[in-house]
Amino acid sequence: MKKVNISIAYEEEKYAALTMYLAQKGMNLETELTAALDSLYAKQVPPAVRDFVSQRISSEQKKEKKKQDKQRTDSA
């Protein structure tokens, strides 16, 4: 599944404080932001569209797995 990188501007001091306190709790910013994006996605994207996207992702993952399995078989 292809992923996209998102870049945002944020106050340096706030970022430093946030990453420091997340680290103290054994958490990381990327994981927390991903969870926040998933929540926003679930809230804003209609269920029918989410189902369609989920099916496309699943289909793409199956194709990638078949491709990897074939490469392993061919190289053996």
Image: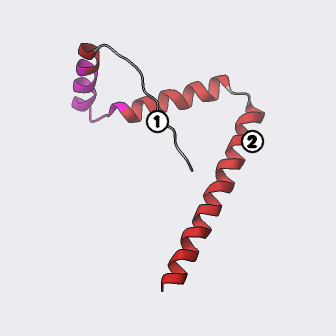
First reached walking from the N terminus: tag 1 or tag 2: 1
Locate residue 7, reporting x and y percent. 43, 27
The residue positioned 73% from the left and 28% from the top of the image is: 46
Q: Which residues are magenta?
A: 16-29
Determine whether 42 is above or below 14 in the image.
below
Q: Is residue 33 left or right of residue 10?
A: right
Mark 2 lies on a secondary structure that is helix
Type of amino acid at the residue the image marks with label 1? Asn
The image quadrant of residue 28 is: top left
Mark 1 lies on a secondary structure that is loop
The residue positioned 66% from the left and 23% from the top of the image is: 44
Neighbour class for label 2 at 10 Å: few (<14), some, many (≥20)? few
Colour setup of the view: secondary structure
The image quadrant of residue 70 is: bottom right
Determine whether 51 is above or below 59 in the image.
above
Residue 45 vs residue 4, the one in the foreground: 4
The residue positioned 48% from the left and 32% from the top of the image is: 35
Determine whether 59 is above or below 11 in the image.
below
Residue 44 vs residue 68, the one in the foreground: 68
Q: Is residue 35 left or right of residue 41?
A: left
Locate residue 49, reporting x and y percent. 74, 34
Identify residue for label 1. Answer: 5
Residue at the bottom extreme of this rendering: 76
The residue positioned 50% from the left and 78% from the top of the image is: 72
Neighbour class for label 1 at 10 Å: few (<14), some, many (≥20)? few
Locate residue 9, reporting x and y percent. 38, 18
Identify residue for label 2. Answer: 52
Q: Marks 1/2: CA distance?
A: 22 Å
Type of amino acid at the residue the image marks with label 2? Phe
